[in-house]
Image (spheres, rainbow, N blue to C red):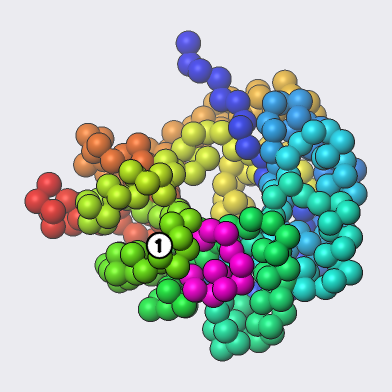
Amino acid sequence: MKAQNVPRSVWITVNRACDMRCRWCYASSAGYVNGSDMSIELAKKIAQLTKDVGVKTVTLIGGEPTLWKHLFEFNDFCTMLGLRTILVTNGRRFRSEEFLREFQQHPTTVVAPSLKAFDEQSSLAITGLGDFEGSRIGMKNICSNSKAHISIVYSTLIQGQLLEMVETAVKLGAFGVRLSVCTPMAENGKFISPYTADYDVMVAEFCDCYNRAMEITHGNLSFELKTPLCIWPRDFVNRLIEQNQIGSGCQFFHRAGVIFDTDGTVMLCNSMFDCPVGKFEDDFSDKRGLLELVNSDKVNTIYDHITAYPSKICVDCELYTHCRGGCPIMWTTKNAEEVISKAKNQKGG
C-alpha cells in the first residue's frame, strides 16, 4: 500500500502588497495588488486546519506580510492554538519604533529576514528602492531582538559581490547567513531566467568566497543551492554535507508542504501560481478533505511529473538524496540532461 502524504509544513500567503520591487522575485508575476489581502477569518480557519492536520509551524509569506493589517491579531491567535509562526520579511517595517514595540507585544515565534542589497546603489538596482538606510535600520532592529539568520538570494544582480552581502548581514547583527540561489521567475505564463546566474560563474564565486564567508559568519553559514550537486567540486560538496550546511531538497520533493494563496487557493510550490490544486472551503474544509486532496490522483500526478529524475545519470548518483537533481523550476529554462552530463564528463564520471 502506498504511504499517505501528510503535510509537514504550511505556508500562508497573507497579502500581495509589497514595499519593494525586487527584480528576481518569484511573486512578481502575481502582482503587488493592494486590497488582495487574506481576511483574518480565513487565516484563522487555515491556522486551525494546520493544527488539526498536526503541523506545528505556519510560515507567513507575501507580498510583504508586515504590511498585512491582521498580523498582530493572527499572531495572537496562533499563540493561543500553540502554533509556531515564522515571518518571512524584508525587514523595512521594523525600522519604525512604533511597529517594533507593537510587534514585541504580539510576536511571531521566528523572524526570518531577507537582505536584498548591501548599499544605496545596489538597493536601487535590485529593489527599485533607494532607501537602503530604512532597510538597514529594520534589519538591525530585528537582529538586536533575536538570533536572526539573514537570507541572501544570489543572482546576477549581486554577482561578484557575494562577500559584500555576507559582510553586510553580519554587520547588521545576523547570527547566521543563509545563501540561496535565484531561480527562474514566471512572466505571462512562461518561466524566464534573466537574473539566474551562470552555473560556472556561481560555482567559482561560492567556492572562492567560502572560507572567508565562514570566518565572517563564525561558521553560521548554510546553503540552499537548488542545483544538482554534480556541478560543484566534490571536496566542496563533501565539506557542506559533513558540516550539515545543505538540506536534502525542498518540501516539494518530500510531498510534504502546502501553500495557501490569499483567497485560500492551494498550491504545491510558491512559484506554481498557474497550477492550483484546490481551494479551501470550495474543495475541502477540514483535515480529512485536505488529506484527500494531497493524496488525490491529480496531485500525485503533478508530483510524479515534476519530481522525476531530471537526467538518467541521477538514477545511480550517490549525491541525489542531497540535491534531488536540483529545483525543478531550474529546468524550465535550462536543459537538465546537458547540464548534468557536462558536469559528469568534466569530472570523468
First to last magenta residue range = 165-177
Snapshot quadrant of residue 161: bottom left
Horizontally, residue 85 falls left or right of residue 344, namely: right
Q: How far across and how far down the image is residue 286, in percent?
A: 78, 26
Q: How far across and how far down the image is residue 324, in percent?
A: 37, 41
Q: Is residue 8 above or below residue 177?
A: above
Q: Pick the residue in front: 69 or 28.
A: 69
Residue at 76% x, 30% y is: 51
Classify mark 1: helix, strand or loop. Answer: helix
| Residue 191 in sight | no
Q: Pick the residue in front: 17 or 58.
A: 58
Q: How far across and how far down the image is residue 342, in percent?
A: 18, 57
* Residue 168 within the magenta-colored segment of the rendering: yes
* Residue 11 within the magenta-colored segment of the rendering: no
Horizontally, residue 346 falls left or right of residue 333, namely: left
Q: Badge 1, how many Cα within 10 Å: few under 14, some, many 20+? A: some
Residue at 40% x, 65% y is: 215
| Residue 58 in sight | yes
Q: Residue at the far top: name it.
A: 1
Snapshot quadrant of residue 113: bottom right
Q: How far across and how far down the image is residue 241, in percent?
A: 34, 44
Q: In this view, does 70 lie above or below 304?
A: below
Snapshot quadrant of residue 88: bottom right
Residue at 65% x, 28% y is: 293
The residue labelled by disc 1 is: 214
- Amino acid carrying label 1: it is Met
Residue at 86% x, 52% y is: 106
